[in-house]
């Protein structure tokens, strides 16, 4: 079958990933300014590990390496992880990134993987993270918010799931969830992980439900238990809900009205 | 995701005037449901009939110019995957010697069916098959709304706009002609807001005409027939409205008003060519000639047949254009697309105008699960190509849907062919059984006559029962005579109709309807005969062997009448088209059923009498 190169009305996967990386640039700049060269080293190491792990996985699955690698999924995951785990020891960051890419991305079939590697990597690193409550990082949060709004304006942000999450957080303000809004991890996960199609249900309704469920689970866990890290909690909730995405799909998808 | 808009660069109207393609060195024509009536090596003149429609869905083909037939046989055609289909190669001799055109002066007297048949013979195509579907025209339902579809909102398409700008008066004439013959309550020319120049060309003509101009603003694919009907037809009109393509309507005007068969069309040539423009080209012109005319710099291009969203790649540039070749695109050869796995973004589902779930459909289609594909409404896919245009993974959604639909269509055709074969087999069995019965009857009859003769010889004096027998025989003779008359009348009627409409297909369609009426009449006659026989039997209680013979005579007369009728129908329906053959078969079946009913009635009468 001859594939016809016709006009395109929407960006390809590679260009989407490029623009998502662009939207992260302000956040990366803030982190470099706050943490100095150590952050740059972490970023580079994580990227190299991710690309290596992705190539290994592709070779193991006997897939063409370059066409898939140049889409930039692995690169985006590495950058996200280095932003989410700022003060972690470098070996831990590398191990988490590599394991997340290999186990959650390649094992579940590449770009269409049901489980997002960033959520998985964050969860893997959780036991070694400091147990103290991370303070709110306002500049980083604002930079992420700006990037997210830019993506929304470009029409590249699938906003249903993040909206569901934010709605729940706002409704739960009386319970004392306000401090969550200052956490940069929440915005990163909402804007760059929950907006990913492959780990959420495919219908808009399903995505709203997905986001709301994630929010409710996360707030319940954070307020009812002593575990303070919102990012790790939300990542765990997202992985759990990704597993239920096929169920939500089968509930919300229908062939539609016959004409 | 909201509905994406198509960049205006793709839809901007070309400022170039209409160009005419120089005579190509060879024409590769496609025989679409038609049978060749010329031979290889024969010289043909422009407008000469090359092939005539061989079914209700085919159209005739005429020579676009004078020349020699070089080959008849399978040729690659400008369709997805360039399948080999029946085609014809014509080598022009450059003289362009034409047959005189005969304009139809009494066209206002044409009936819709006669118009449809004439358009078929003139090679005027609509979306599928002849411009006016024959089955629709034969039923001749009252037409509430007739839409002439001039909407072009697929990227790159400009052929219809160019036609309107160049030939607005001729299009208006054609629409007036269609309005006069088809008598629609409302006749509408639908056009897109962006086709400004074409609208201006029409505005001046639209005053005091039987048609109105409807300017639509909805985005692609609102110009497809189904969405257009949905948006323009009022609820009470939606069931009996018709949508015709503009190019077909223009060709119909040329064919009926000027007697000129459809031999050329306007093609938009765009993309990476030196000068994107619209070119008037003869049907069958090779794609390479059209591209060269527009100035294609080199051969390193993907050649696409069709608009920017629905188009498909052509593997070869010697393929000839056909009546549906709106547009040719030369696109810069890109690095080979390697489709990534579906990332379940859902963009295809949100942009689909038919509210399908293309990602599910794609999964089932690529897994060859045809039933599941039908469950996910593959039949409702209008193949607009929007899903392919937005898929970030660049999956070949449109091509997969097109192929699977084709597979389903083939399966359906095979199923109907199987059904037809089964019916033929059943009819054969019925016929054999009936012949056997008739033979047995003939033998029995002969034996009875022999017995009667012997009895007459034995009895010196004639028996008393001669008078009633004679009266019964008279009645039988009268019935038989009436039936023969009816058969003769019927034999004459189609002839007269044929001489009026000068068309055999017309007669075949009429004969089919006549056959059902005749079958009903035969049944009524048989019932009446049986009642008469029963009355006669009640009056004459002494049942003789001669009475039995009379009953046999009656049966015989009925059978003869039915057979005459069947023959008459066969004579009327004997035409070349297989559609008529079907009609013929139906008539035979109807006659056989009438005969069987008559036999049964007679047998019942015999039993009653006993």
Image (cartoon, rainbow, N blue to C red):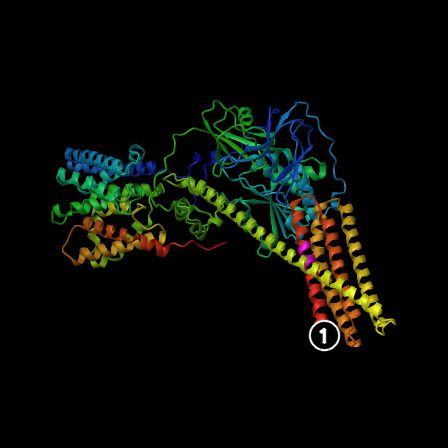
- Residue A202 lies, in percent from the top left, at 35, 50
What secondary structure characterizes most of the magenta part?
A: helix
- The residue at the point 81 percent across, 67 percent down is B454
Q: Nearer the viewer, residue A88 or B482?
A: B482
Evaluate whether residue B184 shows in this view: no
In the rendered image, the vertical position of residue A204 relative to residue B552, given as above or below:
above
Evaluate whether residue B339 shows in this view: yes
Q: Nearer the viewer, residue A176 or B585?
A: B585
Answer with left or right where residue B88 lies relative to residue A170. right
What secondary structure is found at the residue carrying circle 1? loop
- Residue A157 lies, in percent from the top left, at 33, 44
- Residue A124 lies, in percent from the top left, at 17, 46
In the rendered image, the vertical position of residue A234 relative to residue A32, given as above or below:
below
The disc numbered 1 marks a residue on which chain? Answer: B
The magenta-colored residue range is: B587-594
- The residue at the point 80 percent across, 67 percent down is B452
Q: Nearer the viewer, residue B232 or A66?
A: A66
User: Which residue in the structure is indicated by mark 1?
Assistant: B610
Quarter-wise, where is residue B479 in the image? bottom right
Quarter-wise, where is residue B423 in the image? bottom right
Seen from this angle, which residue lies furthest front?
B458
Seen from this angle, which residue lies furthest right?
B461
In the rendered image, the vertical position of residue B423 relative to residue B294, given as above or below:
below
- Residue A245 among magenta residues: no
- Residue B192 lies, in percent from the top left, at 55, 41
């Amino acid at each position: 079958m001859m594939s016809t190169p016709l006009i395109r009305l929407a960006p390809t996967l590679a260009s989407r990933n490029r623009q998502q990386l662009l939207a992260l640039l302000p956040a990366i700049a803030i982190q470099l300014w706050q943490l100095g060269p150590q952050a740059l080293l972490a970023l580079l190491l994580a990227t190299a590990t991710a690309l290596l792990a992705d190539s290994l996985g592709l070779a193991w699955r006997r897939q063409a390496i370059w066409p898939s690698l140049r889409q930039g999924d692995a690169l985006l995951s590495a950058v996200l992880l280095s932003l989410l785990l700022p003060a972690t020891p470098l070996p831990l960051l590398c191990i988490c990134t590599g394991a997340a890419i290999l186990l959650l991305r390649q094992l579940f079939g590449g770009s269409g993987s049901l489980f997002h590697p960033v959520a998985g990597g964050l969860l893997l690193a959780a036991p070694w993270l400091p147990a103290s409550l991370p303070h709110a990082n306002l500049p980083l949060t604002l930079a992420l918010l700006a990037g997210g709004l830019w993506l929304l304006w470009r029409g590249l942000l699938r906003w249903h799931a993040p909206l569901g999450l934010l709605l729940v957080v706002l409704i739960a303000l009386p319970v004392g969830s306000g401090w969550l809004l200052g956490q940069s991890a929440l915005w990163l996960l909402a804007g760059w992980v929950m907006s990913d199609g492959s780990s959420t249900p495919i219908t808009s309704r399903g995505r709203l439900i997905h986001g709301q469920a994630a929010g409710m689970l996360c707030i319940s866990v954070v307020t009812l238990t002593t575990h303070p890290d919102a990012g790790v909690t939300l990542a765990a909730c997202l992985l759990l809900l990704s597993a239920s995405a096929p169920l939500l799909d089968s509930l919300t998808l229908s062939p539609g009205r016959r004409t | 995701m909201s509905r994406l808009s198509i960049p205006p660069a793709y839809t901007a109207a070309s400022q170039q005037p209409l160009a005419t393609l120089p005579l190509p060195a060879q024409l590769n024509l496609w025989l679409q449901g038609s049978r060749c009536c010329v031979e290889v090596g024969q010289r043909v003149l422009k407008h000469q009939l090359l092939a005539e429609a061989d079914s209700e869905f085919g159209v005739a083909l005429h020579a676009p110019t004078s020349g020699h037939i070089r080959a008849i046989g399978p040729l690659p055609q400008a369709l997805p995957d360039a399948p080999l289909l029946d085609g014809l190669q014509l080598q022009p001799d450059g003289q362009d010697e034409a047959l005189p055109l005969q304009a139809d002066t009494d066209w206002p007297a044409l009936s819709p069916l006669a118009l449809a048949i004439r358009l078929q013979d003139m090679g005027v195509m609509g979306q599928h098959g002849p411009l006016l579907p024959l089955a629709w025209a034969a039923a001749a339902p009252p037409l509430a709304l007739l839409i002439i579809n001039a909407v072009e909102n697929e990227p790159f398409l400009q052929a219809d706009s160019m036609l309107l700008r160049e030939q607005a008066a001729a299009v208006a004439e054609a629409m007036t002609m269609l309005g006069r013959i088809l008598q629609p309550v409302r006749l509408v020319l639908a056009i897109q807001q962006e086709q400004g120049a074409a609208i201006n060309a029409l505005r001046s003509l639209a005053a005091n005409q039987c048609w109105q101009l409807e300017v639509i603003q909805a985005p692609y694919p609102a110009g497809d027939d189904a969405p257009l009907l949905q948006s323009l037809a009022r609820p009470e009109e939606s069931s009996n409205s018709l949508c015709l393509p503009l190019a077909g309507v223009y060709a119909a005007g040329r064919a009926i008003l000027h007697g000129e068969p459809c031999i050329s069309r306007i093609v938009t040539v765009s993309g990476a060519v030196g000068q994107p423009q619209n070119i008037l080209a003869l049907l069958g012109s090779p794609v390479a000639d059209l591209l060269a005319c527009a100035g294609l710099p080199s051969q390193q291009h993907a050649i696409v047949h069709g608009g920017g969203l629905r188009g498909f790649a052509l593997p070869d540039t010697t393929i000839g254009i056909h009546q549906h070749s709106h547009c040719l695109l030369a696109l810069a050869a890109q690095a080979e697309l390697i489709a990534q796995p579906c990332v379940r973004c859902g963009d295809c589902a949100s942009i689909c105008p038919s509210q399908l779930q293309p990602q599910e459909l794609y999964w089932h289609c690529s897994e060859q699960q045809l039933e599941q594909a039908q469950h996910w409404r593959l039949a409702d896919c209008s193949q607009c190509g929007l899903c392919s245009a937005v898929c970030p993974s660049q999956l070949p959604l449109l091509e997969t849907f097109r192929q699977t639909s084709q597979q389903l269509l083939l399966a359906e055709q095979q199923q109907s062919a199987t059904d037809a074969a089964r019916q033929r087999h059943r009819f054969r069995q019925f016929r054999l059984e009936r012949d056997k019965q008739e033979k047995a009857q003939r033998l029995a009859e002969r034996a009875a006559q022999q017995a009667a003769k012997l009895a007459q010889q034995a009895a010196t004096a004639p028996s008393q029962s001669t008078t009633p027998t004679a009266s019964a025989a008279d009645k039988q003779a009268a019935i038989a005579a009436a039936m023969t008359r009816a058969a003769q009348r019927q034999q004459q009627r189609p002839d007269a109709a044929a001489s009026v409409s000068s068309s055999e297909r017309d007669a075949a369609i009429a004969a089919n309807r006549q056959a059902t009426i005749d079958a009903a009449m035969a049944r009524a006659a048989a019932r009446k005969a049986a009642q008469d026989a029963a009355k006669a039997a009640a009056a004459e209680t002494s049942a003789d062997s001669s009475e039995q013979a009379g009953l046999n005579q009656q049966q015989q007369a009925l059978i003869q009448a039915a057979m005459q009728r069947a023959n008459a129908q066969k004579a009327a329906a004997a035409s070349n088209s297989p559609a008529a053959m079907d009609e013929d078969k139906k008539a035979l079946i109807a006659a056989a059923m009438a005969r069987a009913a008559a036999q049964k009635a007679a047998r019942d009468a015999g039993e009653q009498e006993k």
